[in-house]
C-alpha cells in the first residue's frame, strides 16, 4: 500500500491492549497493512499504546523484519554464505542488480521488487541460492 492514512491503522490498534506487551504484534500487523513503518506511524502507535516513541523506534530498528522504508511487492535475496559465494553468488548479485536497476537494500522505482543479500539460508547443497519472498531456488545461474 503506497498511500496510507493514520485512520487506516486505528482499527488495528484497537485490537490490542495498551502497553508495551502489544508492540511487536501490532507493528507486524501495521506493516502488513501499509508496507512499512515510517516515523509518523511509529509516533502515532506510541501515543495510542501509551509507550515512549523511543521504545517503538528501538523495536523497529532492532528487528530486521521491520522497515522504515517502503519495500517492493516482492523481495529477492541472494545468499552470500560460503557455499553460495564459491558457486557464483557474486555474479548472481551483479546480474540481478543490473536487471532490476537497483542497489543492494534498494527497491525498484516501480516498487515491484526489493533486492538484498542474506548471509546463509541453510541450503548449501543447492548453492547458489536465490529467494523470492519465501520461495527458495537452488543452483541458480545469472
Image (cartoon, helix red, strand yellow):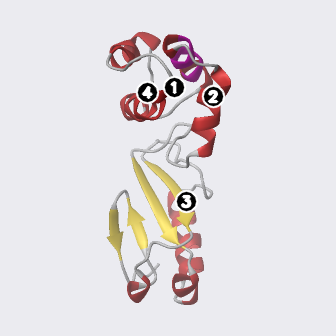
Task: Pick out the residue farthest to the right.
Answer: 54
Looking at marks 4 and 2 on the same chain, the residue that comes earlier in the sequence is marked by 4
Residue contact at pointers 4 and 2, CB within 8 angstroms: no
Secondary structure of residue under mark 1: helix
Q: Position of residue 41 (x, y in %)?
A: 53, 21
Q: Name the foreground residue: 97 vs 7.
A: 7
Tell me if residue 45 is in the magenta stretch. Answer: yes
Which residue lies under the disc numbered 1? 20
Up the image or down, 55 lies above or below 12; here it is below
Badge 4: how crowded within 10 Å, few (<14), some, or many (20+)? some
- Sequence-wise, the earlier of marks 2 and 3 is 2
Residue under label 3: 116
Marker disc for residue 55: 2
Q: Which residues are magenta?
A: 42-47
Query: Where does residue 89 sit, x and y in percent of width and height?
Result: 54, 79
| Pointer 2 or 1: first along the chain | 1
Q: Is residue 49 magenta?
A: no
Measure the alpha-carbon separation of dots 2 and 3.
Answer: 27 Å
Residue at (43% x, 33% y) in the render: 31
Q: Which residue is mark 4?
A: 22
- Residue 58 sits above or below residue 41 on the image: below
Residue in the image at 56% along x and 46% along y: 63
Amino acid at each position: 500500500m503506497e498511500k496510507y492514512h493514520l485512520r487506516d491503522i486505528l482499527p488495528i490498534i484497537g485490537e490490542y491492549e495498551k502497553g508495551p506487551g502489544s508492540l511487536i504484534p501490532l507493528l507486524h500487523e501495521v506493516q502488513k497493512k501499509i508496507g512499512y513503518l515510517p516515523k509518523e506511524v511509529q509516533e502515532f502507535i506510541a501515543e495510542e499504546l501509551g509507550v515512549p516513541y523511543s521504545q517503538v523506534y528501538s523495536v523497529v530498528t532492532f528487528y530486521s523484519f521491520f522497515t522504515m522504508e517502503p519495500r517492493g511487492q516482492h523481495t529477492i535475496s541472494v545468499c552470500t554464505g560460503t557455499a553460495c559465494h564459491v558457486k557464483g553468488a557474486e555474479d548472481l548479485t551483479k546480474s540481478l542488480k543490473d536487471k532490476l536497476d537497483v542497489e543492494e537494500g534498494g527497491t525498484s522505482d516501480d516498487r515491484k521488487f526489493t533486492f538484498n543479500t542474506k548471509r546463509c539460508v541453510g541450503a548449501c547443497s543447492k548453492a547458489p541460492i536465490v529467494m523470492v519472498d519465501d520461495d527458495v531456488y537452488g543452483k541458480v545461474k545469472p
